[in-house]
Image (spheres, rainbow, N blue to C red):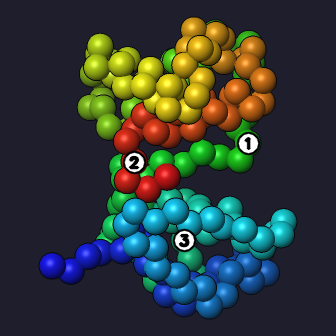
Amino acid sequence: MTRINVVEIKDLAVVIRGRKVLDGITLSIGAGRFTGLIGPNGAGKTTLLKILLGLIKPDGGSVRVFGHKPGQAHNLTGYVPQTTHFDSSFPVSALDVVMMGMLIKQKLGRPAGKGDRQAAKMALEQAGVSHLSNKRFGSLSGGERQKALIARALCGQPRLL
């Protein structure tokens, strides 16, 4: 049985505003692997992640996520952005924000069920912030918000985070 790599990148090239951000990147990540992406500011780390999510199109090379083009694998991936813009006066709880992570898997118009709420609570527990479940998201510290956003990504049960 042939195993498909979670991520398969061959000779990736990306040009943004006339500047080569990534050039000649080749990378394979197998299932069950933990892979860190490190480098200085401006090295293209976020650009590479956005390519894997299908948010940016590469200028050259090929990219596959679970054997699919990146935009076709969105329901298999979870992403926690470095920063988020959020109206801190918007009246939602940490649990509400985490439940938003399930929207991609829900059918349009289907209200969240008891199982969805339980999955969101479990994700908050996995992220170590279950005690913040009913706190207003806008009142959380930056680190607490980030952990709640990790829980939101986990809530969708991604195969790649």
Residue at mark 2: 158
Residues at marks 2 and 1, CA–CA distance in whole angstroms: 20 Å
For the residues carrying marks 1 and 3, which lies nearer the camera in this image?
A: 1
Question: In the picture provided, is 2 more to the left or to the right than 90?
Answer: left
Categorize mark 3 by other alpha carbons within 10 Å: few (<14), some (14-19), many (20+).
some
Residue 92 in view = no
Callout 1 secondary element: loop
Residue at mark 3: 57
- Front in this rendered view, residue 131 or 69: 131
* Residue 76 picture location, percent across and down: 36, 53
**Residue, x 78% and y 24% (percent of image)?**
141
**Residue, x 74% and y 83% (percent of image)?**
20
Callout 3 secondary element: loop
Name the kind of residue labelled 1 in the image. Answer: Thr
Categorize mark 1 by other alpha carbons within 10 Å: few (<14), some (14-19), many (20+).
few
Name the kind of residue labelled 2 in the image. Answer: Pro
114 in relation to 51, above or below: above
6 in relation to 76, above or below: below
Residue 15 in view = yes
C-beta proximity under 8 Å, tags 2 and 1: no
- Front in this rendered view, residue 135 or 30: 30
C-beta proximity under 8 Å, tags 3 and 2: no
* Residue 24 picture location, percent across and down: 62, 91
* Residue 54 picture location, percent across and down: 49, 62
Residues at marks 3 and 2, CA–CA distance in whole angstroms: 22 Å
* Residue 128 picture location, percent across and down: 58, 28
**Disc number for residue 83:** 1
The quarter of the picture where residue 111 lies is: top left
